[in-house]
Image (cartoon, helix red, strand yellow):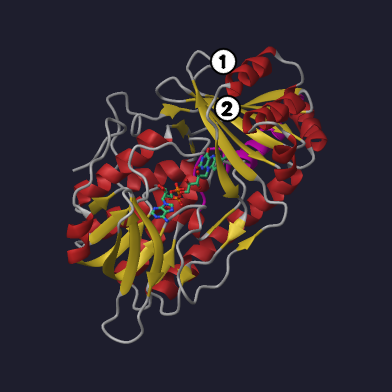
Amino acid sequence: MIASAAGTGVPATLSPDEAARVPWSTIVIGSGPAGTAVAIRLARAGRRILLVDRESMPRPKVCGCCLSSRALVELRGLGCATDDRGRLLGAMPLDRVRLVAAARTVTLPLPVGGTLSRESLDAALVRTAIAAGAAWLPWSHVTGVAEPCGPPPCVTVTCRAAAGAVFSLRADCAVIATGLADHVRVPGSAPRTIEPGSRIGVGTTLAASSIDLPTGELVMAIGRGGYCGIVRLEDGRIDVAAAVDRRQLAASETIGAAVAEVLREAAGPAPWVSAVRAALADAAMQATPPLTRSAGTMAGFYGRVLRVGDAAGYVEPFTGEGMGWALTGGRLAAEALLTASSPATAYGRSFTAFARRHHRRCRRLATALRHPRLVGAAIRVAAVTPTVAAALVPMLVGMTTLSGEPSP
Ligand SMILES: Cc1cc2nc3c(=O)[nH]c(=O)nc-3n(C[C@H](O)[C@H](O)[C@H](O)COP(=O)(O)OP(=O)(O)OC[C@H]3O[C@@H](n4cnc5c(N)ncnc54)[C@H](O)[C@@H]3O)c2cc1C
């Protein structure tokens, strides 16, 4: 069975006590795109899978909510359903990006893309995992994974339930898909690295009427202290997601004020900036840890604990590729766990080969974006030179061809 998007909450399929009695094949920690991509594939292959999250579904998440061509391909590969209008999980088509920097603007067509709230997407993926046979345990915060040495080979996952009770789970292996949060301790892991000067992700959703923004258009505003994406979601709400310098955050009274300042730097005194500023003043903002980081694809000593998605490594989000990377990483980890004699080595190789050049391109772009005047000049040229505009699109939104096909 295949799930569709959104709907109401996704109830647990078992209790912590029941989960503690089962010897699982794999425990997947974190139910974002990376964790669910692993869980769905392993469950469909007949493995006993437990999907655990410290929150329940649906839940908000700081994200631009734009689905890249790669994300769309991976979601189709997981068997996600289209609605009666042919929209994958009900995602709205995204057909243009309005770039704004140094008070200059250009609107570029996008060959392919969609927008879908993280509430809808992640809940649909968890439902798909349950339909595939995975057990689902929300409200369970994992604090550590231990790999006792010697036979039988297994890992012990320590969890804290929402009410505070601590319980342990057992499995042959574990997959850490906890995103940028870094609270799962695994003895023997190499330390993660966070890039100096890494920006912080912040975001919120605003009421549908808060600004006049057509569906299908993504606004990307680039200022000195960061950049911000604004898009209308499938349910009409406005998603605001930004990467902001820590200095800019520290100098602002609120997170919303820091984002409003990025927009002012980018667009000047435009009426839409005032509208967003007013809406942000009352909005509940969420923030992430520093964004650009690397932690490696394996945790611990023995190759029984893998890291996938943002938990393995991430680069600033301007191109909106993170979910596509996470879904791809989840697929590569599942393929390794199902077929390789040494899954950790096989997954490490395949993911590193995949991620290296995408991360490198995004790092270069992140460096260029720290010079908004340069971006403003590029926008001025793109506005009058269609060939320059056409060359900018794949680079900016993470597509490798204008037809929208993702590279391998
Ligand atoms: C500002 C911003 C804008 C972005 N815009 C886009 C965009 O437009 N398009 C795009 O594709 N990507 C975008 N991204 C990136 C995208 O959000 C991430 O790359 C993607 O969500 C990574 O998926 P994941 O499954 O690795 O982690 P997540 O989606 O973060 O999921 C991790 C899950 O793990 C759970 N968890 C965490 N710790 C624990 C624990 N200790 N125990 C149990 N559960 C735990 C969390 O509750 C969460 O459900 C953006 C990111 C930011 C910050």
- The kind of residue tagged 1 is Ile
Some atom of ligand 1 lies within 8 Å of the CB belonging to the residue at label 2: no
Q: Is residue 67 left or right of residue 135?
A: right
Residue that numbered label 1 is attached to: 211
Q: Would residue 268 be seen by someone viewing this image from the given angle?
A: yes
User: Residue 150 appears in which quarter of the rendering?
Assistant: bottom left
Q: Is residue 132 above or below residue 266?
A: below
Rendered image quadrant of residue 278: top right
The residue under the point 58% across, 65% down is 192
Drawn side of residue 16 relative to residue 247, left or right = left
- How many angstroms separate mark 2 from mark 1 (CA)? 10 Å
Secondary structure beneath dot 1 equals loop
Return the x and y of residue 74 as percentages of the image width and height: 39, 47
Left or right: residue 401 compared with residue 26:
right
Q: Position of residue 43 (x, y in %)?
A: 23, 57
Residue 394 placement (x, y as % from top left): 61, 40
- Determine the residue located farthest toward the front in the rendered image: 164
| Disc 1 residue lies near ligand 1 with CB under 8 A | no
Part of the protein shown in magenta:
384-407
Which residue lies most toward the bottom here?
150
Q: Tell which circle, 2 or 1, labels the residue nearer the N-terminal end.
A: 1
Residue 125 lies, in percent from the top left, at 32, 43
Q: Is residue 44 above or below residue 124?
A: below
Q: Nearer the viewer, residue 386 or 313?
A: 313
The answer to whether residue 360 is magenta is no
- Which residue appears at 30% of the width and 48% of the height? 138
Q: Which quadrant holds residue 99?
A: top right
Residue that mark 2 sits on: 230
User: Residue, x 30% and y 56% (percent of image)?
Assistant: 165
Asked whether 137 or 163 is in front, the reply is 163
Q: What SS does tag 2 mark? A: strand
- Amino acid at pointer 2: Ile
